[in-house]
Image: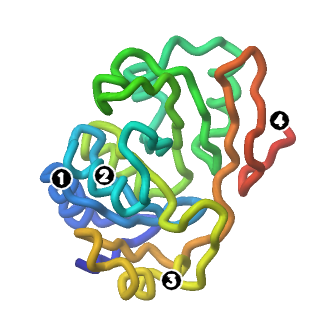
Amino acid sequence: MFLEIHPKNPEPRKIQQVVDCLSKGGLVIYPTDTVYAIGCDIYQTKAIERLCQIKGVKPEKMSFSFICNDLSHISNYTLNLDTPIYKLMRRLLPGAYTFILKANNSIPKLFKNKKRTVGIRIPNHAIPRAIVENLGNPIITTSIHHDDEIIDYITEPYLIYEQLGHLVDIIIDGGTGGVVPSTIIDCTENYPKVLREGKGEVDF
């Protein structure tokens, strides 16, 4: 399905269509404040396996991130944050950042592996945040391209549909996407460390 959704004021009926799809184990391609991404409900095991197949990784080795609506979701999946890290996240989010945090015991249970870290994204984009808010839990997210490979079609929703529509259940048209990924900040040690400089500024 190719579904146009207003990027600033997402239509509730259309957001509910996406939520219903995710709740039933569907895969969705959607816009973010950086690049177009593909994701699924974190509690849908079969969907996670499909996502890993598309990305060519084994589930036990995946390093996808969670999209959250706000910081209230985070404590369900991470260890307690140090005050400076929490303040930094409050200052930079929503925004074009992925924070790598220490995972709590719920993460290995979710993914049946020994994963001890989790990436957290709160994008500055109304569509994915509305989806997560209505779903009631985060969605797993990963960019639709592989590694640092940027392909022409990844910014235009209809071209994405032509290339990847057979692999997923819904492709959301939220306008032209970007080509610069999020800035990744590792917060698992004593001090934040920028692992990848992307769209999010690093002068913090």
Q: Nearer the viewer, mark 3 or mark 1?
A: 1
In the image, is residue 32 above or below residue 174? above
In the image, is residue 88 above or below residue 148? above
Identified at 27% across, 78% down, the residue is 166
In the image, is residue 107 above or below residue 95? above
Dot placed on the residue nearer the N-terminal end, 2 or 1: 1
Q: Dot 2, how many residues are within 10 Å of its Cα: few (below 14), some (14-19), or many (20+)?
A: many
What is the quadrant of the C terminus in the image?
A: top right
Q: Which residue is mark 4?
A: 204
Identified at 49% across, 78% down, the residue is 175
Dot placed on the residue nearer the N-terminal end, 3 or 2: 2
Dot placed on the residue nearer the N-terminal end, 4 or 2: 2
x, y percentage for residue 112? 30, 29
Amino acid carrying mark 3 in the image: Glu
Q: Which residue is mark 1?
A: 25
Cα–Cα gap, marks 4 and 3: 32 Å
Identified at 18% across, 63% down, the residue is 17
Dot placed on the residue nearer the N-terminal end, 3 or 1: 1
Task: State yes or no: discs 3 and 1 in contact (Cβ < 8 Å).
Answer: no
Amino acid carrying mark 4 in the image: Phe
Front in this rendered view, residue 31 or 161: 161
Front in this rendered view, residue 77 or 12: 77
| Mark 3: secondary structure | loop
Cα–Cα gap, marks 3 and 2: 21 Å
Task: State yes or no: discs 2 and 1 in contact (Cβ < 8 Å).
Answer: yes
Amino acid carrying mark 2 in the image: Cys
In the image, is residue 181 above or below residue 188? below
x, y percentage for residue 195? 74, 40
Amino acid carrying mark 1 in the image: Gly
Q: Which residue is mark 2?
A: 40
Q: Which residue is mark 3?
A: 156
